[in-house]
Amino acid sequence: MASVEAAAALDRFSRTIKERHDYARAWKERTGGKVVGYFCSYVPEEVLYALGVLPVRVLGSHEPQDLTERHIFGMFCPYSRDVLAQGLSGRYDYLDGLVFAHCCPHIRQSYESWRIHRPVEFSHLMWVPSMVQSPHAVPFFEDGVRKLTAAAEAWTGKPLSPDALGQAVSTYNLNRRLLAQLYGLRKPEPPTVTGTQAMEVVIASTLTDKAEHNQWLHELLAHPPQASEGGVRLLAVGSENDDTGIIQLLESLGGSVVIEDNCLGNRYFWDEVSPDGDLLSAVAARYLEKPPCPQRDIGPRVRTSFLTGLAREYDVQGVVFLRQKFCDPHAYEVPIIQQAFQDLGLPTLILELDVTTPYGQYRTRIEAFMEMFL
Amino acid sequence: MAVATRYPTRPLECWGKLRELRRKYAKQAWEMGEQGGLVVAAQLPAMPLVAGLGEFARRIYGAYFGKAMREPEVLRQFHEAADARGFARGDMCSSMHHQIGQVLLGLTQTDPFSGISRPVDFVFETNFCHSAAKTAQIAGEVMGVPYFVVDVPHIEGEAARRYVAGQLMDSIGWLEEVSGRTFDDGKFVEAMAHWWHRGVLYARVGETLKAIPAPIDYWQVRALRVPAQVGGHTAEVAEFYEMALAEVEDRAREGISAFGVETCRLSHEGEEMFYAEKFMGEMVQRYGAVFVVGDTGFNTGLWHIDEDGSWKSAPTLKEMGLTLRSREDAIDLLAQALVDHSPIFRCQRLEEKPLEVVKRSQEWRSQGAIIHMDIGCRGMSAGMLEARMALEREGIPTVTYESSNSDPRDFTPSQVTDRLESFLERLGLSRLT
Ligand code: SF4
Ligand code: SF4
């Protein structure tokens, strides 16, 4: 049950997602700053933010489209095609720049085709090492962070001052800390924040000026919802997922998504930048030391223990894999991780996400899954 | 209608040696363990480094690859083994999918000749494509052997080379630890020199196809790659490419063509259909066309790629005036080779791909491009449609066909034939009588 204050605070986040283009345009008008669209949670946003740039994550719209066929194969993931469709359709025409951190070839294609066919003032590609355990990974990524910094400085005409970077890091760290507090509200039974609400808060964070988002979070945490209806405690693991509808569906059918693992959820804000020492190095280290996505887990596998640890910490009863169709980085790990959960006696369900998700069909499958917990 | 342009032709003499080497290395992949050598499982290991440990053989995860490609029923069983374990067929590389099936069935460690168990010592892979890195991880876990993946960024620059060099250097300690052997710098340096040399020579074989008529066709170049992949660190393989290059250069000088007719020159972009290797080449030959250039057929070579996208064979060590003297020298060169000179490690550098595809087509004088929309490959398929548009802009006609490199269930020969025939007719070609 959400109090009037909590409901109003929560509503801001969901409205921001729906009205994200208006939000960014208004921000631009208000501040006179530049807006950069970015493609992966490994983009070190702090650097851009410190230069007065608003980084916003580019998301899909979940509407059928026919703009991308000439540019990207049909068997590339729906998320990457949907994102590209947004760019090609001009919905992001207010963006001044695009920044891409290499995640996989699918989304690299979206960035590349967008850049070619809808050129922006500033575009920058950086590589993210996959072998994050290597002692050479952080120095290499740091080099990438410094190159992004230099390019963005040249573009904005501003040098990055240590004070501005320090301020940006502390604003971002505060955001991470507040989101972690919010996630603490998902631990009790029943959780006071639903999975859908938590997802909306995090997605909104990727679209909003962090200082403002922090303010909104303070207000929400000052008057948190009292309790949700609860349900079967679920962990949702998967690819990028900006479709709150599927979480809503799970929660409307008796599930309660108490924790997730994806880059628009926990992995977006987990772990802070250490404020000590050289800040650009610390920024680089934070991104490579946060819980990895499957693409960054090619050494001795760490995701299995991280995910089973999450399941324990959030007292999960079942696991739902929400995998974008054709998403091979996740396809290579689902059977392994699924086995680990099954070994713990946790039932699992795999659902494939598409540009438009077949809710009708999934309703039946989810209902059957929920019956396992009766 | 184009008139069929005829040239003299004769069989390629180095096929005999090629077959001999193929047989030798195929046998070695299974017998090496018992001969006291090491067996490394990988798709594309950094071969010269492993050679620092002494004698070794490389076995791919799908050790029954050849049999699977000849026998669709066998291939289907491998795919089904992966499906049964939950690896989604349509959602991953189809080559890796059936190879994972083989790993799960225990075949990577079962000798096809005797049926007895022949273990793999470790997995040592390069991340030329994320599919290979993830498969290495699965293979290591399933077989219960140590694995190491060298991450190679698909991006240019000194920092990328340093990152790779650092990992290669670290891998030496790991290799010593898992093999219980002492790494011999001398052997590594020697293997590196051979490996570099065979890569340069292989690329030069590809370059001879710029001649009109092409002395051999693109698929023949591709067929020549096997020794480079299985024994590229050895002197005998480098010598084989000396021989092959001398032969194709002679053919080019003498005007000897691949098949006797070359009415039209074509390029092929994308992975081949491993189970229908001859389909493409034979199909266009019926129209007097010859494939002369492409990506995967050339990517075993070492190339120097200019900023304008043009591909030239990399220089030999002698041409560079370079003598490898130490472990550090060899590591630097290997890192440079992987980041800058091996096209497979550039397959996701999408910003460069359209330019390179256009330039290659122009320099090899291709008159049309056939592009594989490979539903079983993300790595090389990326960037292909933008490359297609770039080709069309430059006036090079294109056609796409859909199938999968390693799953004949996604290949409908009649449909592909129809598409290609109408494309060839669009180019003004007609069936040879
Ligand atoms: S959902 Fe998967 S395939 Fe798509 S961009 Fe993300 S990691 Fe790549
Ligand atoms: S490049 Fe294509 S065929 Fe090769 S491993 Fe990657 S996805 Fe598979």
Image (cartoon, coloured by chain):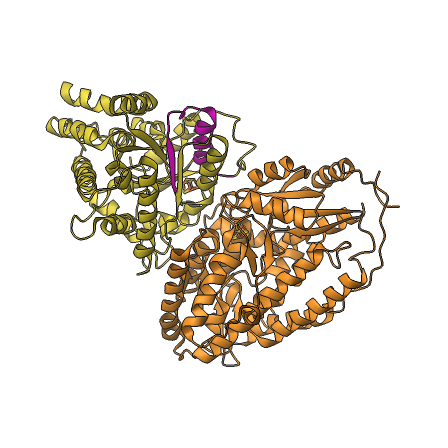
Chain colours: A yellow, B orange
What x and y, as percent, mark residue B250?
Answer: 76, 66
Q: Nearer the viewer, residue B47 or A306?
A: B47
The region drawn magenta spans A76-101
Q: Residue at x 45, y 51 (%)?
A: B154
In the image: residue A290, left or right of residue B233:
left
Compare residues B307 and A125 and report the one nearer the observer. B307
Instruction: Using residue A22 as the reference point, say whether residue B345 is left or right of it.
Output: right
Q: Position of residue B117 (x, y in %)?
A: 51, 71
The residue depicted at 56 percent of the width and 49 percent of the height is: B309
Residue B266 appears left or right of A289: right
Q: Quadrant of the N terminus of chain A?
A: top left
B25 relative to A45, above or below: below
Task: Inspect the magenta stretch and tell me whether residue B44 lies in it.
Answer: no
* Horizontal relation, residue B347 to residue A19: left or right: right
Residue B258: horizontal and vertical position, in percent?
A: 77, 57
Q: Is residue A204 above or below residue B44?
A: above
> Is A78 within the magenta?
yes
Q: Residue at x 46, y 32 (%)?
A: A119
Question: Quick one: quadrant of the C terminus of chain A?
Answer: top left
Q: Residue furthest right?
A: B433
List the single residue furthest toward the front: A157
Is residue B339 visible to the viewer in this orientation of the structure? yes
Image spot of residue B62 (x, y percent): 54, 60
Residue sitting nearer the eye, B416 or B48: B48
Ligand 1 quarter of the rendering: top left
- View extreme (left): residue: A222
